[in-house]
Amino acid sequence: MKIVFKDNTIRFSRMLSIVDKFTFDFVALLEKAGIKYVIVSGYAALLFGRARITEDIDILFDRTDMDKITKLYELVLEDYWFLNAHSLKTVMALLNENSSIRIAKKGTISPNIELKPAKNELDNYSLINATSVIINRKYKIEISPLELQIPYKLYLGAKKDIEDARFLYDIFKEKIDKNKLLHFCRKLGVADKVRYLGD
């Protein structure tokens, strides 16, 4: 798979999985509702071909877009359902508590979206500095910048997370800003884990 990374935009083509299609469809709802978002954590590695299974797609959204959640709620109810909320009031209460809401296609529980508001400096950095990914010249999504995504996976620390970090680093090590990567490793307290990334 040929990957082109230029001007903070990544382009490539490949066959889409069920999880890909599910993710792209949901992102289209966020955009229709006018909500600024960024995809974080495990799906970012799967997007570039990492061979493992995931049941959830983690998405952060801009807290200043809370007033647009009503519109998203209405769009979601057309083809999806909330796994952990039964009303708009419950959805808003969870998000105002910095909890996440889980959303899946009607009649299913997996894959599902875990949607949560940005709540700290690094979340906001991800939103402001998101990297655009264009797949098959048709689908466009926003992911957390790799210089933060990779250290964050090291911070999570599970075997699958470290493997995700190494996978992303192997693909993009010639393109990313390694000084920024090391900065975020230090900020997250995982500078000692950089060795897991290899050369």
Image: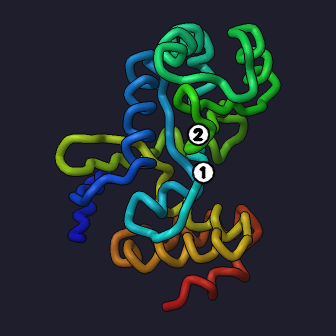
Q: Is residue 199 above or below residue 158?
A: below
Q: Quadrant of the N terminus?
A: bottom left
Q: Amino acid at mark 2?
A: Asn
Kindly identify which numbered label has been placed on residue 55.
1
Q: How many marks?
A: 2
Secondary element under disc 2, as helix, strand or loop, is: strand
The residue positioned 77% from the left and 30% from the top of the image is 98
Color style of the picture: rainbow
* Residue 162 coordinates in the image, percent (x, y): 63, 75
Q: Is residue 34 left or right of residue 158?
A: left
On the image, the x and y values in percent for residue 107 come to 57, 29
Q: Name the image quarter holding residue 181.
A: bottom right
Q: Are marks 2 and 1 in contact (CB under 8 Å)?
A: yes
Residue indicated by mark 2? 112
Q: From the viewer's side, name the closer residue of 179 and 160.
A: 160
Identity of the residue furthest to the front in this view: 107
